[in-house]
Image: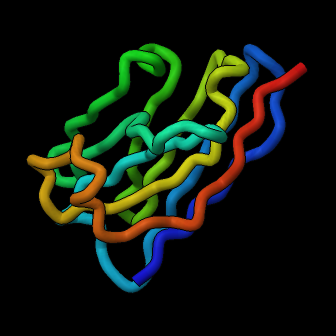
Amino acid sequence: VQLQASGGGLVQPGGSLRLSCAASGFTLKDYVIGWFRQAPGKERDIVAAIIWSGGATYYADSVKDRFTISRDNAKNTVYLQMNSLKPEDTAVYYCAANSRPNTLLRIDRYNYWGQGTQVTVSS
């Protein structure tokens, strides 16, 4: 059972990145998948989440209208499209899976975690 996060990098303010979270060893259809981020010295916070069954989504206020979370059933993969990036979006981004979709805001309910991918927004 593994989640593999990728797609991070260095981008200028106003730029875009797309993160990917690929699952192996299990199917995501019964899970809620969340993207979290953690900046140095700060707590890990949820950024966005998608309930695989039905596709309902959640976004933190700080990323609404800039980030879009989506899924690809065939590839068992979740994406986070990040547009209009700001320096304050700089963090390590993690994806995680939670088998209880009604607890998507509870970080302690996420059973499986990817390894994290660094996103740096700087000119």
Q: Nearer the viewer, residue 87 or 4?
A: 87
Q: Quadrant of residue 105?
A: top left
Q: How many tags in the picture?
A: 0
Q: How is the image coloured?
A: rainbow
Q: Above or below — where is 11 with respect to 101?
A: above
Residue at 37% x, 17% y is 61
Q: What residue occupies the far front of the structure in this picture?
A: 41
Q: Is residue 59 left or right of residue 5?
A: left
Rendered location of residue 110, percent (x, y): 29, 61
Residue at 38% x, 36% y is 48
Rendered location of residue 79, percent (x, y): 49, 47
Rendered location of residue 87, percent (x, y): 72, 20
Asked whether residue 75 appears in the rendered view, the answer is: no
Asked whether residue 80 appears in the rendered view, the answer is: yes
Q: Above or below — where is 72 with respect to 111?
A: above
Q: Quadrant of residue 111?
A: bottom left
Q: Pick the quarter of the image with the N terminus.
A: bottom left
Q: Pick the quarter of the image with the C terminus.
A: top right
Q: Quadrant of residue 54?
A: top left
Q: Nearer the viewer, residue 24 or 103?
A: 103
Residue at 25% x, 54% y is 32
